Amino acid sequence: MLIVADIGNSTVHVGLCRDGKIVRVARAPIDEIARGEGALSVVDGLEAGEIRATVMATVNPAARGAFIDWSRKVVGLVPEEIGGKIPVPIRADVDRPEEVGVDRLLNAFSAFERYGSPCIVVDFGTAITLDGVSSEGAYVGGAIAPGLRLSAEALWDRAAMIPPVEIQPTEEVIGRNTETAVRIGVIQGAVGLVDRLVRRMRPALGGEARVIATGGDADLVAPLSEVIGEVIPELTLDGLRIAYERSVPGGGSHG
């Protein structure tokens, strides 16, 4: 078995792989991982030696050490890193490939492996990222915008009359109070942003690209979008699994 971990800016998404499939998942705040407590449900009931490797990818260098310590403590293994010695096996046709976050490359690679090209991945995390794979199968870049909660936090941090608001779905189209108005603005604003960008990206990718959503807030936006085809919560983790298995001899996740 194999443990894969996508270390983001605020959370760590961890999966347990068996026989080429992700069979358990958990999300945990980075501070819980740092205490050695988060995502323990992924390894619950497993015995020492059942896990062959742990594999991580991160866009948050400050959290790398926390997950390494977690893996040593909880699993007894030092993680291997995708994007470090192990590359993401997709060609990056962009100006500066070294600047592209490994999570964006993994999303593009994972989507391409599932559906071929062209395709677009929309990841709803701390940021909203849209990433395109051309009809030639190359990662060609995309767009980056503030995520739902980052947008909401900017409002209540910088606008004196707007209080903290929990971002959750609403059927209202006109907010009759501040909380509802913020929810409408943040969620529907994200829907409009994504739908417009996808429509502009598709012709540049060389075909009617399939659109896949992932990330912690995907379920808030995807049902309202006219362009998102499906939500795959484990898209990044599956990209980690495939990249590791292809790059490391005997790296398969068979138990």
Image (tube, rainbow, N blue to C red):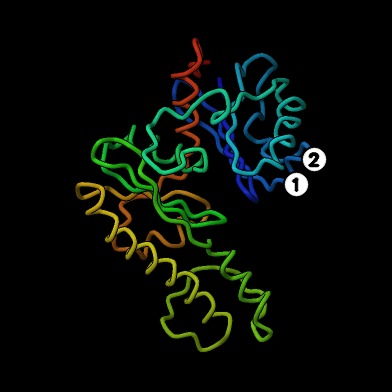
Q: Position of residue 21 (x, y in %)?
A: 45, 27
Name the residue located 32 percent from the left edge and 65 percent from the top edge. Answer: 196
* Residue underneath mark 2: 35
Q: Is residue 78 left or right of residue 23?
A: right
Q: Residues within 10 Å of mark 2 (few under 14, many from 20)?
A: few
Name the residue located 67 percent from the left edge and 40 percent from the top edge. Answer: 61
Q: Is residue 112 visible?
A: yes
Q: Position of residue 177 (x, y in %)?
A: 56, 87
Q: Is residue 72 left or right of residue 161?
A: right
Name the residue located 43 percent from the left edge and 62 percent from the top edge. Answer: 221
Front-most of residues 40 and 32: 32
Front-most of residues 177 and 80: 80
Residue 195: which quarter of the image? bottom left
Kind of residue indicated by mark 2 = Arg
Kind of residue indicated by mark 1 = Asp
* Residue underneath mark 1: 31
88 lies above or below 201: above
Q: Residues within 10 Å of mark 1 (few under 14, many from 20)?
A: some
Contact? badges 1 and 2 (CB < 8 Å):
yes
Q: Position of residue 6 (x, y in %)?
A: 57, 38
72 lies above or below 112: above
Task: Locate the N terminus by quadrant.
Answer: top right
Residue 114: which quarter of the image? top left
Question: Residue lying furthest top in this view?
Answer: 250
Q: Position of residue 13 (x, y in %)?
A: 59, 41
Q: Secondary structure at mark 1?
A: helix
Q: Is residue 235 visible?
A: no
204 lies above or below 112: below
Name the residue located 49 percent from the left edge and 10 percent from the top edge. Answer: 249
CA–CA distance in space, label 1 to label 2: 6 Å
